[in-house]
Image (cartoon, rainbow, N blue to C red):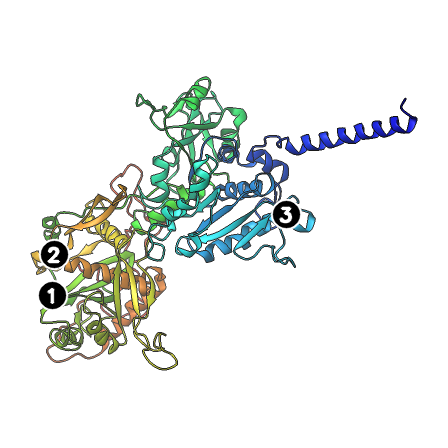
Amino acid sequence: MKTDLQREIEARLKGNLSCIALAAASGLRPDPRMLISEWAEKHRVLPEGSALPGPWRNATAPYLVEPMDVLSPDDPVSEVAIIKAAQSGGSAIAESWIGAIMHKTPAPIMYIQTTVKAAKDWKVEKLDETIRATDVLNPEKGGVVRPMKSRSGEGSTSERIRFQGGFLLLAGSNSAASLRQHSIRFMVRDDTSGWAEDADGEGDPEKLSEQRLKTYKAFGLSKSLDISTPGLKGKNIDRKYEASDKRRYYMACKGCGALNDWDWGDVKRNDAPPYRCHVICEVCETAHFEADKRTMLAPESGACWIPTAPDENGEVPPKTIPREEAERWRTRYTGRYRAGFHITGFMSVFELWDELAKLEDEAGDDPEMLKPFQNTSLGHAYEPKGEGPAWESLSARREGDWHRGVAPAGVLFATLSVDVQGDGLYWERVGWGPNKESWLIDHGFLAGYTDAPLEGAWPKLDQIVDQGFRHACGARCSDDLIGVDSGYHAEAAYAWTRRRHNALALKGQDGWSKLPIYRSESPEVQKTGLSAGKARKFGIRVWQVGTWGIKSTLMVYLSRTPREDRSGFPVGYCHFPADAEEEYFRQLVSEYVTTKKDRNGEVSRVWDKRGPNHWFDCRVYNWALTHFANLWGWSEAKWQERAAYYNDLAKEPGDMFGAMPSAVIAAPPISDAEDELPAGDETSGVKVKTGGAKRPPRDNGLSALANLNR
């Protein structure tokens, strides 16, 4: 017989065992599945100071929902590529994904930016603020992220954010050390179009980062996100998007409900403000304006992402789809393992169409302004000019009323560049004016050895520089800036440039993402004493020149021809004197863009040459010098001041045998949005003013006005 005490003990034991079983089952039961977009709407809070502070709302930018959901741990897609316009909300996808991983799927994460410093800046400006504003992440409110200061030494640091069950590492594409050693499950590669092509000499940083995912990828657990504004067509993020299922956001017509793959090329607008930008449905011809964008983007209207990559039969969705057919196109099999999303400036809720029209007018047909407009404003890859005009057509454009050695009246700034070869020096002197207009003043080749400093051909270069050139104002002038190639016989080039205050040592660097002049380096290092190994304090500086982008720009300008329907010349027009040599023109267009495969089988666009290219290299360096002087940032008043300077030179008495001034020097107005071509002219969209140039502040009494050497 059991006593009452025994029965009570047994009942309590059964109750305790039941509690233990329930607790164990609760611990073993996985968390309910939650999509990244659901997590963001439930938990994420945008900090004060952001454009829309407060709780995250998916309805604000509905096109961000599907890219977030594809990144959810349960989704089978392991690679996601997002090509986007700047400030379109794309980076918020990465922030929401990282926050959800920290809270719900703790694991090792790596975030890679262009540099380690850029990654740290992102952490301070974006991630830290998001963590503070989101309670489930904020360590001060019991969140999963560990605080920066921790007595156990297990807290977060500036390069490693720790959270319960995992960590987030910050890395840079330029630092091989930051891409080593760690096994990573989730990876974000941000701003990949600006990544270094080589990480500390150890190879492609993308390939190095892929090695970090290897362990988790073997078990099907890894996920990676590549997100960036595009650069050149076929490079970086554009290449990854083209190899994906290429999803486009089809927007709904407010009239008939048809889904349209609209983009900036479909916009109708006025030629001048107010632009009244709008798109028209091809089915019902309903016009859609900026105010209709919410309706056009809303999933309730039927708007959705549709893969546009061809399927096994080569079929691709049409530009306009009936709403009832959308699901068929969404679910068809494309055979692509990577999900790709294109977030354009046109569809962005954070961009106004009229503002895009204004930026397009400001860019005109200038390739240096078109590239950032297409890349950052529209979110489209830019295809550079890869082939110049035939040399015969350039030669035929020689102008018969002036000769080498004389700068026409339009020249208000002069540069001279030198390409160093083993048997001599090739040189070119170019004059520059507003609107990037240029005049070849002279060119030549100085024979002689170039390896010995200040010997051989170098004294001949002194004579060319000291002689200067005759300007149309009647005065003999000197070069404003001189650039010398230091990639060959560097010590001799350093010795020559060191003696002249306006001379720069230049060194060309390959690569599409490099700026015209982007940094300087010191090749002179102390060899003895306490400062051994350090750069000399007042030593020579070698300026690095991004040659590939300049070459593409120059090919566009060299192709520009005068138009018969209006006065003036296109932006960047190049003038040549009557006696320029044919060999000069051959070399000026001797290079072209071709494609080649690297050892990994990847195709890339590179510059190649069909013959000697020395004077083309000189033109590249001359163009770099204009950026060094910030010439294209000058205001109209600055150009007029420069014109007044040459007019003052004309007033000074010349020598007995010098040429008499031929004209008043004046700067033509800088092109602006009012200079666009009338609607319907599809040639180039050039911006040039048709009116005469303004009279300079100080006139010398002559009535003639030099107008582009005519």
Cα separation, mark 1 vs mark 2, equals: 14 Å
Please, what secondary structure does the residue beneath circle 2 have?
loop
Q: Which residue is mark 3?
A: 133
Quadrant of the snapshot with the N terminus: top right
Q: Is residue 63 above or below residue 635?
A: above
In the image, 47 versus 25, the foreground residue is: 25
For this rendering, which residue is in front, 423 or 581? 423
Q: Single out the mark in the foreground, 1 or 2.
A: 2
Q: Quadrant of the rendered structure where residue 39 is?
A: top right
**Where in the figure is residue 308, as x and y percent of width and height?**
37, 28
Mark closer to the chain start, 3 or 2: 3
Q: Which residue is mark 1?
A: 444
Check contact, mark 1 vs mark 2: CB within 8 A: no
Q: Is residue 655 visible?
A: yes
Q: Earlier in the sequence, mark 1 or mark 2?
A: 1
Q: Give residue 595's position: percent from left, percent from top.
A: 22, 43
